[in-house]
Image (cartoon, rainbow, N blue to C red):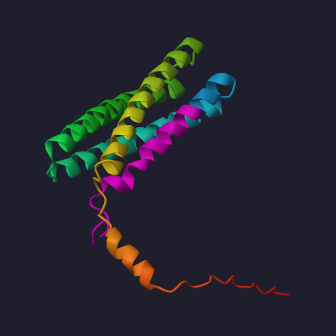
Amino acid sequence: MSLIPAWAPNLHPLVVHFPIALLSAAGAVDLAGLLAPDRRPLRDTATWLYVGGAATAVFTYFTGYTAAQAAAFSPEVGSLVDAHADRAFTATWLFAFFASLRLAMSYILRPRRALQIGAFAIALAGLGALAQTTLLGARLVFEQGLGVQAVAVAESAERMERAPAQPVERAEREDPE
């Protein structure tokens, strides 16, 4: 039994959104923790979101690397894949390092305001690298069609023309009383 559904080209598109969501949420919670410095639970939540985001980023990076190695690209697409991989490498390993720093800040070091602000600046740099990675990935999908199947537009339009228009009826719900 394969982990990859038949409709998916590889595992990468199935996991890529986890680090984006977790790391974005971590940045938002981290900012809230900076604005409310007496709220340690916010800082700890941000830490664990960074850890989860970093772990899923590492996994996602390797699924993307594996997918890229298994495919053949035109030179134009290949250069875009390389740029995406370079940004992903930077974002992934920056957050892997940063997550360990945040764990130390949450459980070993005394949280000083200057350290928290400096750590948030590093997180912003990582989120910038993540945003660049995401934009390049979006270009690969939406401009180059990487990882998507072609849709037979002419065949679908022809099928719609032949099908008679059916009115849509709303089903009436019965009250259980």
State yes or no: residue 123 in magenta: no
At x 42%, y 84%, the residue is: 162
Above or below 46: residue 68: below
Q: Nearer the viewer, residue 23 or 9?
A: 9
At x 55%, y 12%, the residue is: 114
At x 31%, y 30%, the residue is: 90
Above or below 71: residue 112: above
Q: Nearer the viewer, residue 157 or 58?
A: 157
Residue 35 screen position, x and y as percent: 67, 23
Residue 125 screen position, x and y as percent: 43, 24
Above or below 130: residue 145: below
Residue 42 screen position, x and y as percent: 63, 33
Above or below 118: residue 142: below
At x 37%, y 56%, the residue is: 14
The magenta region covers: 1-28
Q: Nearer the viewer, residue 33 or 72?
A: 72
- Quarter-of-image position of residue 61: top left
In this picture, residue 154 sits left or right of residue 114? left
Residue 27 screen position, x and y as percent: 53, 32
State yes or no: residue 26 in magenta: yes
How many marks the image carries: the answer is: 0
- Figure quadrant of the C terminus: bottom right
In this picture, residue 105 sits left or right of residue 97? right
- Quarter-of-image position of residue 171: bottom right
- Figure quadrant of the N terminus: bottom left
Q: Name the residue at the right extreme.
A: 177
